[in-house]
Amino acid sequence: MTAAIEVQGVEKRFGSFVALAGISLTIQQGEFFALLGPNGAGKTTLISALAGLTRASSGTLGVMGHDVVTDYQAARRSLGIVPQEIVFDPFFSVRETLRFQAGYFGVARGRTLDDWIDELLAKLSLSDKADHNMRQLSGGMKRRVLVAQALVHRPPVIVLDEPTAGVDVELRQTLWAFIRELNGKGHTILLTTHYLEEAQQLCSRIAMMKMGRIVAMDTTDHLLNAFSERVLRVKIDGELPLSQVAVRTRQQGAWHHFTIHDLAEVETRLAGLREAGARITNMEVAEPDLEEVFLNVMHR
């Protein structure tokens, strides 16, 4: 099967600054893939190269088997991008904006397009704003329109570059419900986000970037198991017995942390605390966390 996104040895230099230092990455059709990294890691530069907004200094990029340079028209028709920045034309209504966007990709006007636009507006809770001028919309509503613009030509590959930055909970829930539905129908999703819980819940595979390089890439489960751990956290009344200090992994405020490998080990650890004379006042089991994985990978 042709890969949805194929990146091979891509470098991008701006003078002496190296934004991308030999990135290679393959995303298969139907994947929900996260690209994570701190600000300045090169994520948006890579997306810009995929979209044809900037040209790589070396290497190749393809979308659905179409080279973004030599077969750029087919590559761009295969791609829908939701950018970080809110950019809009102040002279058109929401519906007019979507019709024009579809026209850029050669989608003919007619009942089929109008039905699809109506569906997008309904899925993104924009139906009552369809005939409003873009200038009348709130920031969150404008971001919903950006999502609709990226989808109006029905691309098989969708890139979401920080789609929920600064938006309310309602939009996040609406957006992710719709994106999950599209992914379930076979659309490939590439997500960049600083909300790591989103990536952990949504994505089956993750790549982490730092200084223009991919420094970790694996399935979400494998990354969680390799760089994070399940932890029993307990609060006790008084001091922790010395016999238990030796097996404690760390202390964070009033919480004492004990690494556990499976849930069956919880009772064994609690029994050890009780036998040592500790009186437990509170406890919880913390599952492996992508934020911990991210920090460990970035700082190693």
Image (tube, grey):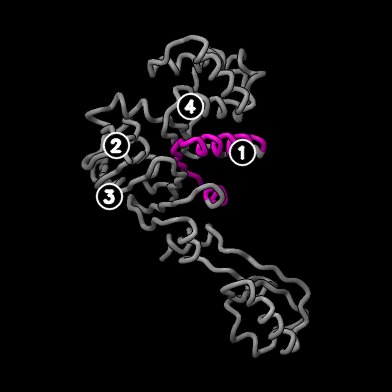
Between the C-alphas of marks 1 and 4, the distance is 17 Å
Q: Which residue is mark 2?
A: 62
In this view, which residue lies farthest toward the top?
110
Q: Which residue is mark 4?
A: 151
Alpha-carbon neighbours of circle 4 within 10 Å: few (<14), some, or many (≥20)?
A: many
Q: Earlier in the sequence, mark 1 or mark 3?
A: 3
Q: Amino acid at mark 1?
A: Arg
**Earlier sequence position, callout 2 versus callout 1:** 2
Residue type, label 2? Gly
Q: Secondary structure at mark 1?
A: helix
Point out the tag, 2 or 3, that comes first from the N-terminus: 3
Disc 3 marks which amino acid?
Answer: Ala
On whether residue 109 falls in the magenta region, the answer is no
Q: Which span is picked out in magenta?
A: 170-199
The span from disc 4 to disc 2 (Cα, nearest Å) is 19 Å
The tag earlier along the polypeptide, 1 or 4, is: 4
Q: Which residue is mark 3?
A: 21
| 3D distance between C-alphas at marks 1 and 3 | 33 Å
Could you say where residue 150 lies in the image, as x and y percent from the top left? 47, 27
Judge depth for marks 2 and 1 and give the one in front. 2
* Mark 2 crowdedness (10 Å alpha carbons): few <14, some 14-19, many ≥20: many
* Residue 36 image offset from top left, x and y in percent: 44, 49
Identify which residue is drawn at 39% across, 17% down: 104
The disc labelled 4 sits on which kind of residue?
Leu
Q: Please give the label number shown on residue 172.
A: 1
The percent position of residue 99, horizontal first and vertical second, equals 49, 14
